[in-house]
Image (spheres, rainbow, N blue to C red):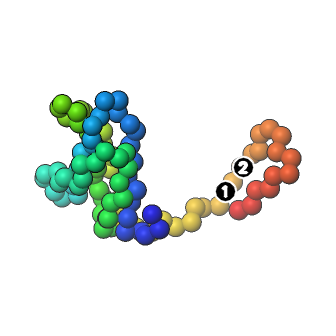
Amino acid sequence: PQNIRQALVSWNVAVGAKQYILQKKSADAENWQDVVATTNTSFVLNVDPIHLYLRVAAMNVGLGSWDSWEGDVGQPVGIPDDVNNLDAVGDFVGTSVSW
């Protein structure tokens, strides 16, 4: 997404899944909140600048195990520090690298 207040959440296909359940919670929340039940393997989530916990499970007859992620979202990330000790391995004729 082009908007810093959105995060693209994606996961691998689960064989036999009829849909996926995506849930979220913040660091200070006790309970998980349903975000979406979808047949897709990705979702664009609107986010605030927080430490976010996400989990997704595949569903068929029953609910599969949860796969989870956590991290800071909705905050700008600065440019990386200077690159040092960069090596080119192999034959890269006609290729240029600039930083």
Q: Amino acid at mark 2?
A: Leu
Q: Using the image, tell me which numbered label, if any, was put on residue 86.
A: 2
Secondary structure state at the residue bearing disc 2: loop
Q: Residue at x 75, y 45 (%)?
A: 87
State left or right for residue 26 relative to residue 42: left
Q: CA distance from mark 1 to mark 2?
A: 7 Å
Q: Total number of numbered labels?
A: 2
Of all residues, the one furthest to the right in this rendering is 93
Residue shown at the point (23%, 36%) measured from the top left? 59
Which corner quadrant of the image does residue 21 belong to? top left
79 or 24: nearer the viewer: 24
Identified at 33% across, 60% down, the residue is 45
* Residue at screen point 22% across, 33% down: 60
- Quadrant into which the C terminus falls: bottom right
Please name the amino acid that badge 1 sits on.
Val
Quadrant placement of the N terminus: bottom left
Q: Identify residue for label 1.
A: 83
- Looking at the rendered structure, the secondary structure element under dot 1 is loop
Q: Which residue is more in the foreground, 20 or 26? A: 20
Label 1, residues with CA under 10 Å away: few <14, some 14-19, many ≥20 = few
Residue 96 x/y as whole percent: 80, 56
Can the viewer see residue 39 in this picture? Answer: yes
Q: Position of residue 58 (x, y in %)?
A: 27, 37
* Mark 1 vs 2: CB contact within 8 A: yes
Residue 89 x %, y %: 77, 39
Q: Quadrant of residue 88?
A: top right
